[in-house]
Image: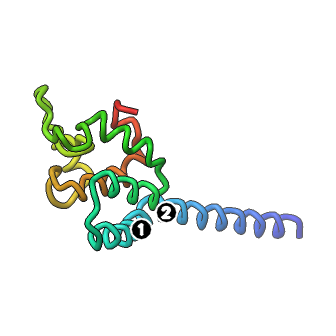
Amino acid sequence: MKKTLLLLLSIIILALIFLYMGRVYDKGINTPEIDLKLTVKLVEAQDVSLEQAIIQYSIHNGINYETSLRIANCESKMGKYKTNWEGSSAKGIFMFTDGTWNYINAKGSQLDDIENIKQFTIWYKIHPEWWSCK
């Protein structure tokens, strides 16, 4: 009886862990795309500045917008310099390299401001170490 109860309890605990891990995985991979669809409509429906777009995407996706603005200013002077002149392939507001852009399977060009901001809001939460500007 004790062994059966212990086995049943172990199975229930493993099932709960499995369900929890599945939810964490889903939130980490799938949820940003769903959230960003709503944000894209917000940004595209309005005539917004780059700064406003960065703020809206950041707030909507749980990133401190002051940090996002600071990084955009450090990386490209808020889009003034969208090409790296030091020999790197980095481009865009948040200076994604060609290799990183391909790795993340981003759509469009690094020079597409909205796409660059969108990808930053996805990947900064996962890999903040990709940006030396803080």
Percent across and percent down for residue 79 are: 21, 44
Coloring applied to the structure: rainbow
In the rendered structure, which amino acid carries the disc numbered 1? Asp
Q: Nearer the viewer, residue 111 or 104?
A: 111
Q: Quadrant of the N terminus?
A: bottom right
Residue, x 10% and y 28% (percent of image)? 87
Nearer to me, 72 or 20: 72
Residue 41, image x, y percentages = 32, 73
Q: Quadrant of residue 74?
A: top left
Q: Which mark is residue 12?
A: none
CA distance separating discs 2 and 1: 11 Å
Residue name at image x 11 percent, y 29 percent = 85
The residue labelled by disc 1 is 35
Mark 2 vs mark 1: in front:
1
- C-beta proximity under 8 Å, tags 2 and 1: no
Residue 10 in the image: state x and y as whole percent.
74, 63
Q: How many residues crowd around disc 2 within 10 Å: few (fewer than 14), some, or many (20 or more)? A: few
Chain-order first, disc 2 or disc 1: 2
State the image coordinates of residue 53 (x, y, percent, origin top left): 32, 58
Q: Which residue is mark 2?
A: 27
- State which quadrant residue 4 falls in: bottom right
Instruction: Determine the residue positioned at 40% across, 33% down.
Output: 134
Q: Give the farthest residue toward the top.
A: 86
Q: Is disc 2 placed on a helix, strand or loop?
A: helix
Callout 1: 10 Å neighbours few (<14), some, many (20+)?
Answer: some
From what the image shows, is residue 37 above or below residue 52?
below
- Identity, as a three-letter code, of the amino acid under mark 2: Lys
